[in-house]
Image (spheres, grey):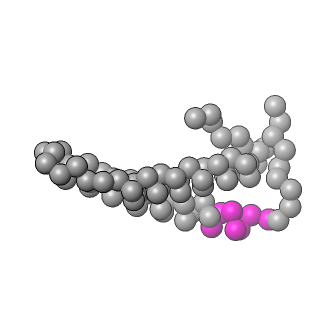
Amino acid sequence: MPPFEHSESGRATTHALGDLIRRLRDLILALDGRAPRTGHASEPAIARDAAVLRQKAVQRLADLSADAKAAPDGPPERVNP
């Protein structure tokens, strides 16, 4: 995954922010669709880790969504090559 582009102000560009939000949603959907593998000794630990990861992704998505709503309207900032 390429690094996210940032504007001169240090904020992620609108495109990068949208891509990150999409990836977080995909991660949450994948974790929600995960089927437990009964009979595997490590399943309880894997399920706990998946739940923690999902909660972190949900929180990050909420934070990014709030940042996106707080951003001023207008065209995205240009990224200098």
Q: Residue at x 81, y 40 (%)?
A: 79
**Is residue 45 rendered to the left or right of residue 26?**
left
The residue lying furthest to the top in this view is 81
Q: Quadrant of residue 55?
A: bottom left
71 or 10, nearer to the observer: 71
Q: Quadrant of residue 72?
A: bottom right
**Is residue 79 rendered to the left or right of residue 31?**
right
* Vertical relation: 48 (above or below) 3: below
Q: How many marks?
A: 0
Residue 45 picture location, percent across and down: 21, 50
Q: Residue at x 54, y 60 (%)?
A: 61
Please say whether residue 52 is visible from this viewpoint: no
Q: Quadrant of residue 8?
A: top right
Residue 47 picture location, percent across and down: 26, 54
The secondary structure making up most of the magenta span is helix
Question: Residue 68 lies in magenta, yes or no?
Answer: yes
**Is residue 57 rendered to the left or right of residue 47?**
right
- Image quadrant holding the N terminus, namely top right
Please say whether residue 15 is visible from this viewpoint: yes
- Image quadrant holding the C terminus, namely top right
Residue 23 picture location, percent across and down: 56, 49
76 or 18, nearer to the observer: 18
7 or 4, nearer to the observer: 4
Q: Residue at x 72, y 43 (%)?
A: 6
The magenta stretch spans which residues?
A: 66-72
Question: Residue 25 lies in magenta, yes or no?
Answer: no
Q: Residue at x 60, y 55 (%)?
A: 21
Residue 3 picture location, percent across and down: 63, 36
* Vertical relation: 2 (above or below) 17: above
